[in-house]
Image (tube, rainbow, N blue to C red):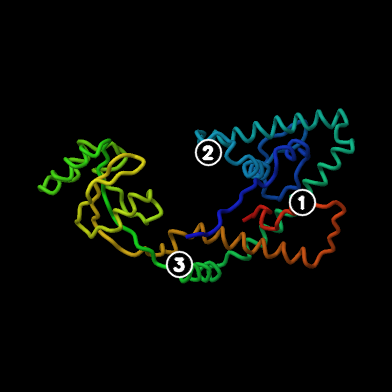
Protein backbone atom coordinates (compact mmCIF):
# COMPACT_ATOMS: atom_id res chain seq x y z
CA UNK A 1 0.00 0.00 0.00
CA UNK A 2 1.15 3.52 -0.68
CA UNK A 3 0.52 5.47 2.51
CA UNK A 4 3.11 8.27 2.90
CA UNK A 5 5.85 7.71 5.43
CA UNK A 6 5.64 9.78 8.57
CA UNK A 7 8.18 12.56 9.03
CA UNK A 8 9.57 12.72 12.55
CA UNK A 9 11.14 15.58 14.53
CA UNK A 10 12.01 15.52 18.25
CA UNK A 11 9.87 17.50 20.68
CA UNK A 12 12.68 19.94 21.37
CA UNK A 13 16.16 20.47 20.00
CA UNK A 14 19.26 19.93 22.07
CA UNK A 15 20.15 23.58 21.47
CA UNK A 16 16.93 24.68 23.07
CA UNK A 17 17.45 22.37 26.01
CA UNK A 18 20.88 23.81 26.73
CA UNK A 19 19.81 27.39 26.11
CA UNK A 20 16.85 27.38 28.48
CA UNK A 21 17.62 25.11 31.41
CA UNK A 22 15.59 27.23 33.75
CA UNK A 23 13.19 25.45 36.13
CA UNK A 24 10.19 24.11 34.19
CA UNK A 25 6.73 24.83 35.57
CA UNK A 26 6.05 21.65 37.48
CA UNK A 27 2.83 19.85 38.23
CA UNK A 28 2.17 18.95 41.85
CA UNK A 29 2.87 15.29 41.09
CA UNK A 30 6.34 15.94 39.65
CA UNK A 31 9.07 14.08 41.52
CA UNK A 32 12.31 15.97 42.19
CA UNK A 33 15.24 13.76 41.16
CA UNK A 34 18.12 16.18 41.71
CA UNK A 35 18.92 19.81 42.45
CA UNK A 36 21.65 21.86 40.78
CA UNK A 37 22.55 25.03 42.67
CA UNK A 38 18.99 25.18 43.94
CA UNK A 39 17.30 24.34 40.62
CA UNK A 40 15.07 21.24 40.69
CA UNK A 41 15.28 18.55 38.05
CA UNK A 42 12.13 16.40 37.98
CA UNK A 43 10.78 13.31 36.30
CA UNK A 44 8.84 15.66 33.99
CA UNK A 45 12.16 17.12 32.85
CA UNK A 46 13.43 13.59 32.19
CA UNK A 47 10.38 12.84 30.04
CA UNK A 48 10.95 15.97 27.94
CA UNK A 49 14.66 15.17 27.58
CA UNK A 50 13.83 11.61 26.50
CA UNK A 51 11.49 12.91 23.78
CA UNK A 52 14.14 15.38 22.63
CA UNK A 53 17.11 13.02 22.55
CA UNK A 54 15.19 10.07 21.09
CA UNK A 55 17.50 7.50 19.47
CA UNK A 56 20.66 9.31 20.60
CA UNK A 57 20.27 7.68 24.02
CA UNK A 58 22.37 4.46 23.90
CA UNK A 59 20.00 1.59 23.11
CA UNK A 60 21.93 -0.94 25.16
CA UNK A 61 20.95 0.78 28.41
CA UNK A 62 18.26 -0.77 30.56
CA UNK A 63 15.51 1.37 32.10
CA UNK A 64 17.60 2.32 35.12
CA UNK A 65 20.67 3.10 33.01
CA UNK A 66 18.55 5.18 30.61
CA UNK A 67 17.17 7.23 33.49
CA UNK A 68 20.68 7.81 34.86
CA UNK A 69 21.92 8.86 31.42
CA UNK A 70 19.12 11.41 31.04
CA UNK A 71 19.58 12.70 34.57
CA UNK A 72 23.32 13.21 34.00
CA UNK A 73 22.50 14.99 30.74
CA UNK A 74 20.11 17.37 32.53
CA UNK A 75 22.53 18.00 35.39
CA UNK A 76 25.39 18.82 33.00
CA UNK A 77 23.11 20.93 30.84
CA UNK A 78 21.84 22.88 33.82
CA UNK A 79 25.38 23.55 35.06
CA UNK A 80 26.47 24.77 31.61
CA UNK A 81 23.36 26.92 31.19
CA UNK A 82 23.81 28.47 34.64
CA UNK A 83 27.42 29.35 33.81
CA UNK A 84 26.35 30.82 30.46
CA UNK A 85 23.77 32.94 32.25
CA UNK A 86 26.42 34.19 34.69
CA UNK A 87 28.44 35.30 31.67
CA UNK A 88 25.33 37.08 30.37
CA UNK A 89 25.20 35.04 27.18
CA UNK A 90 21.42 35.18 27.36
CA UNK A 91 21.38 38.94 26.90
CA UNK A 92 22.60 39.20 23.32
CA UNK A 93 20.36 39.71 20.26
CA UNK A 94 21.20 36.31 18.81
CA UNK A 95 19.97 34.55 21.93
CA UNK A 96 16.69 36.44 21.83
CA UNK A 97 16.19 35.46 18.18
CA UNK A 98 16.90 31.81 18.90
CA UNK A 99 14.56 31.86 21.88
CA UNK A 100 11.79 33.37 19.74
CA UNK A 101 12.37 30.71 17.06
CA UNK A 102 12.13 27.82 19.52
CA UNK A 103 9.14 29.40 21.23
CA UNK A 104 7.33 29.39 17.88
CA UNK A 105 8.54 25.86 17.13
CA UNK A 106 7.18 24.49 20.40
CA UNK A 107 3.85 26.21 19.83
CA UNK A 108 3.70 24.79 16.29
CA UNK A 109 4.42 21.28 17.54
CA UNK A 110 1.87 21.59 20.33
CA UNK A 111 -0.88 22.54 17.87
CA UNK A 112 0.12 19.85 15.36
CA UNK A 113 0.02 17.32 18.18
CA UNK A 114 -3.49 18.46 19.05
CA UNK A 115 -4.60 18.18 15.39
CA UNK A 116 -3.11 14.70 15.16
CA UNK A 117 -4.81 13.54 18.33
CA UNK A 118 -8.17 14.76 17.10
CA UNK A 119 -7.69 13.14 13.67
CA UNK A 120 -6.71 9.69 14.90
CA UNK A 121 -10.11 8.29 15.81
CA UNK A 122 -11.14 4.64 15.27
CA UNK A 123 -13.81 5.70 12.76
CA UNK A 124 -11.39 7.86 10.77
CA UNK A 125 -8.72 5.15 10.68
CA UNK A 126 -11.21 2.52 9.57
CA UNK A 127 -12.69 4.79 6.89
CA UNK A 128 -9.23 5.63 5.52
CA UNK A 129 -8.28 1.95 5.47
CA UNK A 130 -11.44 0.96 3.61
CA UNK A 131 -10.93 3.69 1.01
CA UNK A 132 -7.36 2.53 0.39
CA UNK A 133 -8.43 -1.11 0.18
CA UNK A 134 -11.15 -0.25 -2.33
CA UNK A 135 -8.73 1.74 -4.51
CA UNK A 136 -6.10 -1.01 -4.55
CA UNK A 137 -6.52 -3.20 -7.65
CA UNK A 138 -5.59 -6.89 -7.30
CA UNK A 139 -2.29 -7.85 -8.91
CA UNK A 140 -1.05 -11.29 -9.83
CA UNK A 141 1.78 -12.74 -7.77
CA UNK A 142 3.56 -16.06 -7.82
CA UNK A 143 5.23 -18.28 -5.27
CA UNK A 144 8.39 -19.57 -6.91
CA UNK A 145 11.78 -21.05 -6.25
CA UNK A 146 14.93 -21.08 -8.35
CA UNK A 147 18.44 -22.42 -8.67
CA UNK A 148 21.10 -19.90 -9.73
CA UNK A 149 24.34 -20.97 -11.41
CA UNK A 150 27.08 -19.31 -13.43
CA UNK A 151 26.77 -21.01 -16.82
CA UNK A 152 24.09 -22.20 -19.22
CA UNK A 153 25.63 -25.67 -19.26
CA UNK A 154 25.19 -25.98 -15.50
CA UNK A 155 21.59 -24.80 -15.79
CA UNK A 156 20.89 -27.33 -18.56
CA UNK A 157 22.19 -30.14 -16.38
CA UNK A 158 20.06 -28.98 -13.44
CA UNK A 159 16.93 -28.80 -15.60
CA UNK A 160 17.47 -32.41 -16.71
CA UNK A 161 17.95 -33.60 -13.11
CA UNK A 162 14.77 -31.83 -11.99
CA UNK A 163 12.69 -33.22 -14.85
CA UNK A 164 14.04 -36.66 -13.99
CA UNK A 165 12.44 -36.28 -10.58
CA UNK A 166 15.26 -35.14 -8.29
CA UNK A 167 14.37 -32.96 -5.31
CA UNK A 168 14.45 -29.24 -6.13
CA UNK A 169 15.40 -28.02 -2.65
CA UNK A 170 18.20 -30.56 -2.35
CA UNK A 171 19.79 -29.48 -5.65
CA UNK A 172 19.36 -25.79 -4.73
CA UNK A 173 21.22 -26.30 -1.45
CA UNK A 174 23.91 -28.24 -3.28
CA UNK A 175 24.54 -25.98 -6.28
CA UNK A 176 22.72 -22.64 -6.14
CA UNK A 177 24.72 -19.43 -5.87
CA UNK A 178 21.73 -17.83 -4.14
CA UNK A 179 22.53 -18.73 -0.55
CA UNK A 180 19.98 -16.26 0.81
CA UNK A 181 16.97 -18.43 -0.04
CA UNK A 182 16.03 -21.64 1.74
CA UNK A 183 16.19 -24.39 -0.86
CA UNK A 184 15.78 -21.75 -3.54
CA UNK A 185 12.39 -20.60 -2.18
CA UNK A 186 11.72 -16.94 -3.01
CA UNK A 187 8.28 -16.74 -1.41
CA UNK A 188 5.50 -14.67 -2.99
CA UNK A 189 6.36 -11.77 -5.30
CA UNK A 190 4.76 -9.55 -7.92
CA UNK A 191 6.26 -8.89 -11.34
CA UNK A 192 7.98 -5.62 -10.41
CA UNK A 193 9.79 -7.20 -7.46
CA UNK A 194 12.20 -9.17 -9.65
CA UNK A 195 14.36 -8.39 -12.67
CA UNK A 196 12.50 -8.37 -16.03
CA UNK A 197 14.06 -11.54 -17.48
CA UNK A 198 13.18 -13.50 -14.36
CA UNK A 199 9.64 -12.05 -14.23
CA UNK A 200 8.96 -12.81 -17.91
CA UNK A 201 9.84 -16.46 -17.36
CA UNK A 202 8.20 -16.97 -13.97
CA UNK A 203 4.86 -15.40 -14.87
CA UNK A 204 4.50 -17.65 -17.94
CA UNK A 205 4.76 -20.84 -15.91
CA UNK A 206 1.88 -22.82 -14.44
CA UNK A 207 2.08 -24.22 -10.89
CA UNK A 208 4.50 -27.13 -10.84
CA UNK A 209 6.19 -26.27 -14.15
CA UNK A 210 9.95 -25.92 -14.45
CA UNK A 211 11.47 -23.34 -16.77
CA UNK A 212 14.31 -23.86 -19.24
CA UNK A 213 17.51 -22.01 -18.30
CA UNK A 214 16.89 -18.25 -18.04
CA UNK A 215 19.70 -15.70 -18.18
CA UNK A 216 19.62 -12.53 -16.05
CA UNK A 217 22.22 -10.07 -14.81
CA UNK A 218 22.89 -12.44 -11.89
CA UNK A 219 23.57 -15.59 -13.90
CA UNK A 220 21.49 -18.53 -15.14
CA UNK A 221 18.27 -19.55 -13.39
CA UNK A 222 16.09 -22.62 -13.41
CA UNK A 223 12.70 -21.62 -12.01
CA UNK A 224 9.75 -23.55 -10.65
CA UNK A 225 6.43 -21.85 -9.87
CA UNK A 226 4.65 -23.40 -6.89
CA UNK A 227 1.43 -21.34 -6.85
CA UNK A 228 -0.29 -18.32 -8.39
CA UNK A 229 -2.77 -15.92 -6.79
CA UNK A 230 -4.03 -12.34 -6.81
CA UNK A 231 -2.62 -10.01 -4.18
CA UNK A 232 -4.79 -9.41 -1.16
CA UNK A 233 -5.00 -6.07 0.60
CA UNK A 234 -3.32 -6.51 4.01
CA UNK A 235 -5.58 -6.66 7.10
CA UNK A 236 -6.10 -3.48 9.10
CA UNK A 237 -3.96 -4.53 12.07
CA UNK A 238 -1.00 -5.16 9.77
CA UNK A 239 -1.02 -1.65 8.31
CA UNK A 240 -2.48 0.32 11.22
CA UNK A 241 0.73 2.31 11.76
CA UNK A 242 0.85 3.33 8.08
CA UNK A 243 -2.81 4.30 8.13
CA UNK A 244 -2.27 6.34 11.29
CA UNK A 245 0.72 8.17 9.80
CA UNK A 246 -1.25 8.95 6.66
CA UNK A 247 -4.25 10.25 8.62
CA UNK A 248 -2.03 12.43 10.81
CA UNK A 249 -0.09 13.92 7.91
CA UNK A 250 -3.25 14.54 5.89
CA UNK A 251 -4.99 16.30 8.80
CA UNK A 252 -1.97 18.47 9.60
CA UNK A 253 -1.33 19.37 5.97
CA UNK A 254 -4.94 20.38 5.36
CA UNK A 255 -4.97 22.43 8.57
CA UNK A 256 -1.82 24.34 7.56
CA UNK A 257 -3.15 24.87 4.04
CA UNK A 258 -6.30 26.45 5.51
CA UNK A 259 -4.19 28.69 7.72
CA UNK A 260 -2.31 29.84 4.64
CA UNK A 261 -5.55 30.65 2.87
CA UNK A 262 -6.86 32.61 5.85
CA UNK A 263 -3.59 34.35 6.75
CA UNK A 264 -2.13 37.47 5.20
CA UNK A 265 1.24 36.39 3.81
CA UNK A 266 3.53 38.91 2.12
CA UNK A 267 6.77 37.60 0.59
CA UNK A 268 9.30 40.41 0.40
CA UNK A 269 11.83 38.32 -1.48
CA UNK A 270 11.15 36.10 -4.47
CA UNK A 271 11.39 32.43 -3.52
CA UNK A 272 12.40 30.05 -6.30
CA UNK A 273 10.52 27.13 -4.75
CA UNK A 274 8.21 27.84 -1.80
CA UNK A 275 8.14 25.03 0.74
CA UNK A 276 4.82 23.15 0.51
CA UNK A 277 2.76 22.74 3.68
CA UNK A 278 3.25 18.96 3.58
CA UNK A 279 6.92 19.44 4.50
CA UNK A 280 5.99 20.62 7.98
CA UNK A 281 6.81 17.77 10.37
CA UNK A 282 3.84 15.96 11.80
CA UNK A 283 3.40 15.51 15.53
CA UNK A 284 1.34 12.88 17.26
In the displayed structure, 196 sits above or below 240; it is above
Q: In the picture provided, is 166 more to the left or to the right than 32? A: left
In the displayed structure, 236 sits above or below 267; it is below
Q: Which residue is mark 1?
A: 272
Badge 2: few (under 14), some or many (20 or more) residues near its Cα, within 10 Å?
A: few
Q: Kindly identify which numbered label has been placed on residue 71.
A: none
Q: Secondary structure at mark 3?
A: loop
Residue for point 53% across, 68% down: 128
Give the mark toward the camera: 3 or 1: 1
Marks 1 and 2 sit apart, C-alpha to C-alpha, by 48 Å
Residue found farthest to the left: 164
Give the mark toward the camera: 1 or 2: 1
Q: Secondary structure at mark 1?
A: loop
Badge 3: few (under 14), some or many (20 or more) residues near its Cα, within 10 Å?
A: some
* Image location of residue 281, percent across then percent down: 66, 52
In the displayed structure, 84 sits above or below 147; it is above
Q: Which residue is mark 3?
A: 136
Marks 3 and 1 sit apart, C-alpha to C-alpha, by 36 Å
Q: Kindly identify which numbered label has been placed on residue 63.
A: 2
Q: Earlier in the sequence, mark 2 or mark 3?
A: 2
Instruction: Work out whether residue 65 or residue 167 is closer to the camera in this orientation and state it.
Output: 167
Instruction: Identify the image quadrant of residue 183.
Output: top left
Residue for point 87% across, 53% down: 268
* Image location of residue 135, percent across then percent down: 48, 70
Residue for point 66% across, 41% down: 49
Amino acid sequence: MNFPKKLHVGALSVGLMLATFAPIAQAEAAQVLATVNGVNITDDDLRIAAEDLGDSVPRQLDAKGRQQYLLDYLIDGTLVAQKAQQEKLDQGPDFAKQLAYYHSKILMEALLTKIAREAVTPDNLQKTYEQAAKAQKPEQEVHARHILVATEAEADAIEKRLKAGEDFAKIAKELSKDTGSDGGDLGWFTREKVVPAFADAAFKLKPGEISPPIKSEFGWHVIQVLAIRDTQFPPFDQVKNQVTSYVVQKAQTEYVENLRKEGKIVRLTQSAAPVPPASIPDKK
